[in-house]
Image (tube, grey):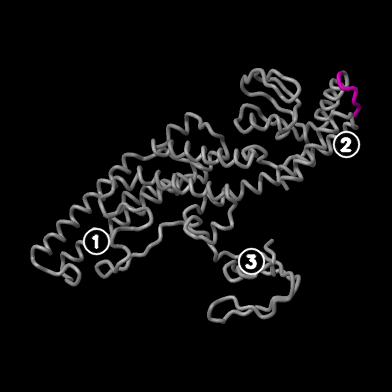
Amino acid sequence: MGSYSSTEEETLDDFGESGVDDLVVSLYQMDLDRTLFLLRSYLRLRLQKIEKYMMHISKSEDLLSRLSQQEQRFAKSCTEMMEKHLEQSVLSKLPYGYDSVTRQSLSSTEDDMGIPFDLIIIPEPQLDTFVFCKTKSDVGAFQLDDIGEEVVDLVADDLYVLRYKSIKGLVESGQIDLI
Amino acid sequence: MYGRRASQLLKEVDSCEAGQLVPFNSDVFDQVIRECNEHNTQFQSLIRKMVEQNLDIETTRNDDHYGAAVHHLSLLRNKRCLMAYMYNRAEVIQSFRWKIGPVLPHEIQEKLHFSEKEYFKNHSAAIKSYMSEMDIDLTVDMVPPKDPYIQVRVLEDIGEVSLGDHSISLTKNSLHFLRRTDTEQFISQSLCENQRTYAVSAVKFWISDMELVRKHNQADSKQEW
């Protein structure tokens, strides 16, 4: 897409020099503007997602590998900055043992005085929400939960509202489209 | 009641409209921090008492044990609340970078904790370095473009601005018909106002205006509409 927009920019420059009809130039300009808008929105949305789940993303190698080099750097510096911010505003003022970003307290991984503490502070994407999706091909009987109580027959080109978590695998393998 | 003050902070964040920010409540914030330290002192002294009585801290279940547990849990709850308070504010603050720009107006600056100001600056810098690596400005073009040209009214004196091949003086309250991409940076800083947003009923005016500009352009470029 980046290369498409730069080719178009060149075309536009050529037009400007060779005196092509104004209408054609402005049509090209509009197309270029729209392409650039799409490109920017795409990159912007990705950055905003990284901002939202920075700690969750930087924890997982799998998620990190989906980012571009520049995005990885962005995610890394974002996480560092957020940690630094939380560190200097809250954690540095708390007593020793309670001043970790990711752990509730020093003892929180152990069974702490009979009370288990493994509450997670890191915000994670909500995978249980329902999404609209459209099947590309016949999937057949598909199990929606772990125990096999909910089974749905996915027919090609049909619309469904399902929990994202259960169809995650199908989305990744390209058998189903999100709408 | 333990933990009430901390939850007050969160209620403040929650009752605020999405994307808006209330002033940083340093009074309650400091009180909660003090409460945390108080809990810790109590917790430590209860543990010490149990040690002095030669009891095994791991297995004993007496009054002191549950007392300590209450202090410990209250501290954790306070910590969660404080972290959530800061984190949710930080999320709003970083959204300002997209909505307002790299420089925050004075009204917003006043509402921030010093660490939050720093965070905003660092975060802007991270976005900036990403944009320079990718060689694309992501802070313009926030709405889908409809026309390559738009009419704008200047809200504040901007002065002489060079736009591609010519320069133009943007004085307060003047109307201009410009390439959208050229004006975008001023619109996001709210120095210009996009006239089209409220000029729906004035389409005719809009078209005649466009012709006027075209005629004006014809003089030097000999191009016809």
The percent coordinates of residue B110 (x first, y second) are: 43, 32
Separation (CA) of disc 2 from disc 3: 41 Å
Q: Chain of mark 2?
A: A
Extreme left residue here? B53
- Mark closer to the observer (1, 3): 3
Measure the C-alpha gap from mark 1 to mark 2. 74 Å
State the residue position of label 3: A172
Instruction: Tell me the residue that label 1 is attached to.
Output: B70
SS state under label 2 = helix
For residue B24, side relative to residue A39 (left or right): left
Q: Quarter-wise, where is residue B142 in the image?
A: top right
Bounds of the magenta span?
Answer: B220-225
The amino acid on which the numbered mark 2 sits, given as a three-letter code, is: Val
How far across and down, in percent of the image, does residue A46 sit?
Answer: 60, 50
Question: Which residue is located at x 83 percent, y 27 percent?
Answer: B210
| Residue A71 within the magenta-colored segment of the rendering | no
Count neighbours of disc 2 (C-alpha within 10 A) and say few if under 14, some if 14 to 19, many if 20 or more: few
Q: Are marks 2 and 3 in contact (CB under 8 Å)?
A: no
Task: Name the magenta segment's main secondary structure.
Answer: loop
Q: Is residue B168 above or below residue B118?
A: above
Q: Which label was assigned to residue A24? A: 2
Seen at 50% across and 45% down, the residue is B17
Q: CA distance from mark 1 to mark 3?
A: 46 Å
Label 1 marks which chain's residue?
B
Q: Secondary structure at mark 1?
A: helix
Identify which residue, B46 or A78, lies in the foreground: A78
Looking at the image, residue A172 sits to the left or right of residue B167; the answer is left
Whole-percent x and y of residue A158? Answer: 74, 71
Q: Quadrant of residue A110?
A: bottom left
Mark 1 residue type: Val
